[in-house]
Amino acid sequence: MTMGEKFSVAEVAALRNELLQGGLDSFQTAELLKMFLSGRGYGVSPESALDAAGRIDCAGCDVEALHQELETLALVM
């Protein structure tokens, strides 16, 4: 984890695996993102989580894209 990053690569990779195995729709993905963030002390609006879920899906759930989305979402608190 570099300076300024809120989440480790291992955390993001574990979340990515959960997303890939789940066969989730956008709403379920958004809920998982919200749970991930709230479990680490961050708040996120449902709308922001849903927007991010759509972008993650479009990015093919790439670890870097997912990490970037989480870092951005966590700023929203």
Image: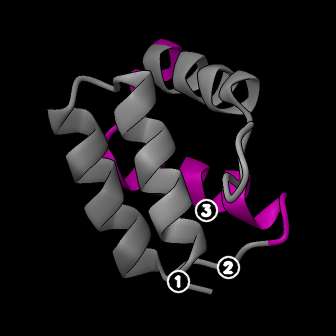
Q: Position of residue 60 (x, y in %)?
A: 23, 23
Could you tell which of marks 2 and 3 lies nearer the N-terminus?
3
Dot 1, crowdedness within 10 Å: few (<14), some or many (≥20)?
few
Q: How far apart, in angstroms, are the residues tagged by discs 2 and 1?
A: 7 Å
Residue range in magenta is 21-41
Residue indicated by mark 3: 34
Q: Secondary structure at mark 3?
A: helix
Q: How far apart, in angstroms, are the residues tagged by discs 3 and 1?
A: 12 Å
Q: Position of residue 4 (x, y in %)?
A: 68, 59
Give me the residue at 68% from left, 21% from top.
14
Residue indicated by mark 1: 76
* 37 over 9 or under it: above or below: below
Q: How far apart, in angstroms, are the residues tagged by discs 2 and 3?
A: 8 Å
Q: Nearer the viewer, residue 44 or 67?
A: 67
Identified by mark 2, the residue type is Gly
Identified by mark 1, the residue type is Val
Give me the residue at 51% from left, 13% from top.
21
* 55 over 14 or under it: above or below: below
Residue indicated by mark 2: 43
